[in-house]
Image (tube, rainbow, N blue to C red):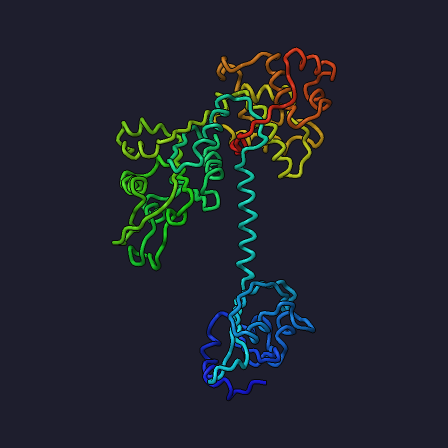
């Protein structure tokens, strides 16, 4: 047993050790705890006099490959991360750093162990890994059905430009899935393991946007009580997605231009120029070239952002994708709301095809969620389940060139439905016999669905 006189100065530091957040224990050659600080008491209770393996792990014999035993034997420091069960029965993760305790002659008389509770850090790491896997799944390029040549060409472009560091400007109407295209670019780039940071420039007041984007130093303005690194610093070595970039003021555009030109900027109130490594992807539903002509968007910034332009067409310009997207969204909504609506009737699908979808996929999600709550389980969505706005808009108000014949509608419906329905279900939804369905397939040369490698999850939002 180690006596107080043997460790002299270490015990004199007890009052100091009780103030630190990490646990500190002193263990004698018999593996018995002879001292611990307040942090250890909070983790495990009063363990003075207990054997370390009994105190930490509730064991009746030393741990296999015990770090303390090794330290007592060779005097070399050890660092391990291990799990144990705390006094409340909850699993704890501990980072333990063990080192020798020596007397004045250099003889090993015990061991000192520093214990850090890493339980919350491990929980956050697991949560981050789960979220990261889900984001990668959502941004992956597999098994999405599309008939649109325009979208297929966009997928091909993404595969080519994702590994580069070039800036991208995504344009298109609201609701077309610009952020998910940006996520797809990030997920297929060399930066995929680094942060993807998204900021809606239109959602942050102008007087706060500079501080949020570029950061500030303590005392830079009233209320700046601490340093703030800024969103750009958060995205360092990753990807920064600036949604609604066309709404940034001319003053901030100048600072953003500098980040794009040489990767540097200054925090608000700072005299030091900081260097950043970040890929920037911008997005807007504005006509940026018109904004340049109107003098509200810098031409030099436009050229810097528009290195790789991607235009996302609205649904009305790719009607062949409306039915597949509608059925995909319906399945997603059914899962989210624990519903069993079997599909969208052929009559209602035609209304979907004819409707101009001014809000694009976001509007379609709202329409289907609305209809889902009115429809019955084990039945299809019908016209009467649609929102009044969609029902009240007459066909005469919609572009005539977008209307399709019943035959063409049936052909598109078969293509859309076959990805997630059996032959029997397709025939039932379309109100035809299986024989009739087979004949139509043969006449139109329709096989099973086309799976596009490289298809984006942009259809999900």
* Residue 144 drawn above or below residue 53: above
Q: Position of residue 181 (x, y in %)?
A: 47, 34
Q: Position of residue 398 (x, y in %)?
A: 50, 17
Q: Position of residue 77 (x, y in %)?
A: 51, 70
Point 54% across, 18% down: residue: 354
| Quadrant the N terminus occupies | bottom right
Task: Name the one closer to the observer, 416 or 186.
Answer: 186
Q: Image quadrant of residue 72?
A: bottom right
State the residue lying farthest toward the front: 74
* Residue 200 drawn above or below residue 447: below
In-image side of 437 versus 189 (left or right): right
Point 53% across, 55% down: residue: 124
State the residue lying farthest toward the bottom: 5
Query: Residue 255, can we see it?
Result: yes
Task: Name the one closer to the observer, 109 or 114.
Answer: 109
Q: Position of residue 9 (x, y in %)?
A: 45, 84
């Amino acid at each position: 047993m180690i006596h107080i006189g043997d460790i002299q100065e270490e015990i004199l530091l007890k009052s100091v050790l009780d103030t630190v957040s990490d646990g500190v224990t002193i263990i004698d050659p018999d593996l018995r705890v002879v001292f611990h600080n307040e942090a250890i008491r909070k983790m495990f209770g009063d363990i003075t006099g207990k054997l370390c393996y009994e105190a930490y792990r509730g064991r009746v014999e030393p741990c296999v490959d015990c770090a303390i035993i090794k330290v007592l034997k060779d005097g070399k420091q050890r660092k391990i991360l291990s799990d144990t069960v705390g006094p409340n029965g909850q699993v704890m993760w501990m980072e333990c750093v063990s080192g020798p305790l020596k007397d004045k002659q250099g003889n090993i008389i015990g061991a000192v162990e520093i214990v850090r509770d890493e339980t919350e850090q491990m929980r956050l790491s697991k949560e981050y890994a789960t979220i990261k896997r889900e984001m990668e799944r959502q941004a992956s390029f597999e098994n999405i059905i599309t008939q649109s040549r325009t979208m297929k060409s966009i997928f091909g472009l993404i595969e080519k430009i994702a590994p580069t560091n070039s800036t991208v400007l995504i344009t298109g109407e609201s609701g077309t899935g610009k952020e998910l295209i940006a996520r797809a670019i990030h997920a297929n780039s060399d930066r995929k393991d680094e942060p993807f940071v998204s900021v809606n420039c239109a959602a942050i007041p102008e007087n706060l946007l500079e501080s949020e984007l570029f950061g500030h130093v303590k005392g830079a303005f009233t209320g700046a009580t601490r340093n703030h690194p800024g969103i750009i610093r958060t995205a360092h070595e990753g990807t920064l997605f600036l949604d609604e970039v066309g709404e940034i003021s001319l003053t901030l555009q100048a600072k953003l231009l500098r980040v794009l030109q040489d990767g540097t900027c200054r925090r608000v109130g700072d005299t030091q120029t900081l260097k950043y490594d970040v890929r920037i992807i911008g997005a807007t539903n504005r006509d940026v070239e018109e904004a340049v002509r109107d003098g509200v968007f810098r031409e030099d910034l436009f050229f810097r952002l528009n290195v790789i332009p991607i235009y996302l067409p609205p649904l009305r310009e790719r009607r062949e994708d409306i039915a597949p997207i509608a059925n995909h969204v319906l399945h997603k909504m059914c899962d989210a709301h624990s519903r069993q609506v079997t599909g969208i009737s052929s009559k209602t699908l035609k209304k979907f095809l004819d409707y101009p979808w001014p809000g694009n996929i976001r509007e379609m999600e709202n329409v289907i969620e609305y209809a889902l709550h009115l429809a019955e389980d084990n039945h299809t969505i019908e016209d009467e389940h649609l929102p009044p706005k969609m029902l009240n808009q007459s066909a005469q108000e919609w572009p005539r060139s977008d209307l399709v014949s019943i035959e063409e509608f049936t052909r598109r419906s078969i293509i859309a439905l076959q990805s997630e329905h059996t032959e029997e279900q397709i025939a039932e939804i379309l109100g035809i016999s299986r024989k009739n369905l087979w004949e139509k397939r043969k006449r139109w040369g329709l096989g099973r669905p086309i799976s596009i490698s490289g298809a984006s999850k942009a259809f999900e939002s």
